[in-house]
Structures are given as structure tokens and as C-alpha cells.
Image (cartoon, rainbow, N blue to C red):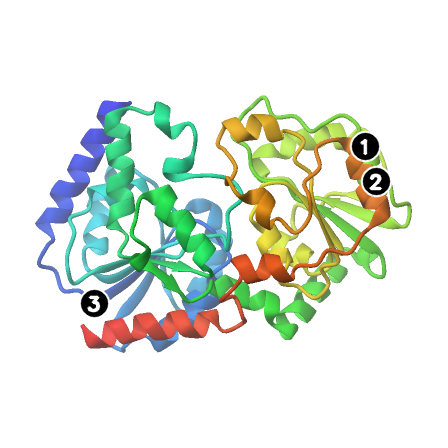
Amino acid sequence: MKILKVLYLWLIKLVSGLNLFRSRNKVIYLMSFDDNVDFIKELAQKIPSKMTLIVLYRPDTEAAATDLAAFGLITRPFRDGVKFVFDLVPLLMSAKLIICDNYYAFLGGLHRRRDTKIVQIWHAAGAIKKFGWEDRTTANRSKSDKQRFQAVYDHFDEYIVASKAMGNVFVTSYHENFDKMKLLGYPRSDQYLDRNWQRVARQRIYRAAPELKDKRVILYAPTYRPHQSFKLPVGLSDALAADASAIVVVKLHPVLRDRENAVREIGNPRIKFYHELATSDLLAVADTLVTDYSSVAFDFSLLPNAKSLIFFMFDNEQYQKDPGIQDDYLDWLPTKPITTVHELKQAIVAAKPTNFDDFNNWWNTFNDGHATQRVVKRYVQFLKSH
């Protein structure tokens, strides 16, 4: 498998090298998350007329890609493989600007061009869990693996961040210089500060789930875990539903959806599952968010309806080992994390309001509702001046 990865990157380097002299008249957005659609549309409208914006998307973001296609943009699905190398690598090499919302391993094989800028826009405003070089499992990887990782990190010319805190996370996690960090704010955060978006999101939720209206809504949204051994703790359902006047919405990652069975078996009618509803929309009606190491906390804290935030880290000891938690997390979490279902039950009943001021000053510094405007302006100026 490792040899195949090396050969794959070699093939990408070979093909990208053959296309070094193609005209640079494209803007490519690499999409693996579906929450930057508004930003992509805004950028498409502002780029110079001689440029074409193309969205290459992972298949699980097809709904967002369909929206963008209806808007008039060119969209193409992609998976790693030989077809990608020969069909889409030449397209990437025709780009003046490449914007990535995630880590893409194939970037490590692309030839670098001084006149092409590669930007990391990421998919979270902050980080509780560790990743990159800070992920504790990375130390156990082979030398060749580590070289491949750093090759990808080094391909990014700029990182869009919302705070010095997140910039420093990339510095340590990717071994990059802070001067690559651009304090512009995350475009996707603008919606949470937009009253019209908040109103429309609430309407979407209440239309699909009218039972949530005029109720205390407790949203349980833990982070994704890759381990098959992951299990929700015994007694979780009773703890989440401890407030008899509230409705609990459980929103697990699709990969972990089979773990819902243990909660469903309880049969509590006040515990709901809405797979078809977007987490971002559910945040707009939630009074209390229960999460753990998920970046959803950074989004929730921006909303006016956010009353309380509970960090339920029942597997804290294991998670500290793999992948790890930011060393200073206890210094800036807005509430002290809890680890037992008994503590969770007490916190649900108490419904103690959370003060988000310091938390937002630390992580959402530049998420002020105008991030899209600043990011679009920066890269439109780049396209016009080069």
C-alpha cells in the first residue's frame, strides 16, 4: 500500500510537470465540506472576467455541488485514482488560485509554480483535538509518511484563520511559519451572525420539525471518531433527557450512525433524530449544545440563541492518547469539561448560562460577519495583480 502511494504521487508529479506551461486562467476550489457555498458564489461573481472558477468536489458533498451548478458554476466530482491524475491534475495545473477546505494528500505530488497560489481555508474556526504533527499517532508513522505529510503542508502558501490562536495551531500542527497565517476570519462563520440566515434556518427547522418550536432544544453533537470500538456511555439517554420540558436532538456523524441504536432502544419520545436536517441549521434553534472535541462549539458560540455549552468528554483519557487534545484547552474552554453521565445530568438540569466572551475573543476574533468580504477582496486583488 505504501509503495502504491509513492507511485501515485510520482505519477501526479510526472503529469503535473508536463503541464507547467498551460495558461493560468482558472480558480479551483477543492471541496470536501459543504458549508462554504455562499463564499464560493461570492468569489465566482467577483473574480476577473477572464478567469473561470471550477469546483472539484468529493462525492459526499454532491448536494452542495448541485446548488453551485444551478448557480452556473462548473463542478466535477473527484476521487483519488488514475482517472483523477490524467483528467484533473492538468486542470489543477491551469489554476492561478487553488483554495482547499481540507488536507488533500495529492497536493504533495504537484509541481510548484511561483505564479500559482494555494490557500488553505480549512473547515473549522478553532481546534480542540490535535492534528498533523501534534496528533500523537503521527510519531509512530514511517519516515516516508512524515515526508509526504510535510510535502502537503508546505504546498500551502497561505492559511485563512479567524484568530492568532488558530494560526498558532497551524504553526505547531503543520510546522509552518506564522507569516503564512492570514487573519481574515472564516467566510462560513458569516451566516451565524446574519439575522436573515438565522431566521431562515429556524424556519427550515420548524417546517420539518414543528415539535421543536417553543421548547428548550438540547443538541447532542459529538465529534467523529474513527475507531470501531467507540460506544456511547451507558445512561447517556437518561442524562440528556433529564429536563422533562426539553427536547433532545441527537446528531451523530454519518459514519457513527449505527451507534444511535443504543439511544433509540430507550424509546424516549423526547429524544429525536433528524438525519435530513443540517447541523448548522439545528444550531440556530438549540438552547444547549452538548459536544466534546468538535469544532461545532466554535460555531454555536456565535449565535444569539446559544444559552449553554456543555463539553461531555466521557472518553477524555483515551482521546488524550489518540489523537490528543490541545495542551492548553482547559485555559480557554468556556465551561469546565465533564466526564460522567451523572455530571451531565446535573448540568442539563442546572442549565447554567455560559459566558462566551473570552472564548470568542480567543478563537472567533475575526469572525465578525464580514469575513467573506475580506477573503474575497484579498484573492480578487491577487488575481487582478498577477
Residue 88: in sight, yes or no? Answer: no
What's the mark number on residue 342? 1
| In this view, the mark in front (3 or 2) | 2
Mark 2 lies on a secondary structure that is helix
Question: Residue 272 is drawn in which quadrant?
Answer: top right
Alpha-carbon span between mark 2 and mark 1:
6 Å
Ranked by sequence position, the earlier of labels 1 and 3 is: 3
Name the residue: 28% across, 76% down: 381
Q: Which of 207/256 is in front?
A: 256
What amino acid is labelled 2 in the image? Answer: Gln
Q: Secondary structure at mark 1?
A: helix
In the rendered structure, the answer to whether residue 143 lies left or right of residue 233 reads left
**CB within 8 Å, label 2 to label 1:** yes
Amino acid marked by disc 1: His
**Does residue 338 appear left or right of residue 268 in this picture?**
left
Query: CA–CA distance between discs 1 and 3?
Result: 59 Å
Residue occupying image coordinates x 54% and y 68%: 190
Residue 338 is drawn in which quadrant? Answer: top right
Nearer the camera: disc 1 or disc 3: 1
Disc 1 crowd rating (10 Å Cα; few below 14, some 14-19, many 20+) is few
Which residue is depicted at the point 85% across and 37% down?
268
Q: Amino acid at mark 3?
A: Asn
Pinpoint residue 311: horizontal percent, then vertical percent: 67, 43
Q: Are marks 3 and 2 in contact (CB under 8 Å)?
A: no
Residue 346 is tagged as 2
* Residue 252 pos. (x, y %): 64, 40
Q: Secondary structure at mark 3?
A: loop
Q: Which residue is mark 3?
A: 25
Residue 63 in view:
yes
- Above or below 190: residue 271: above
In the rendered view, does 172 fall on the left or right side of 309? left
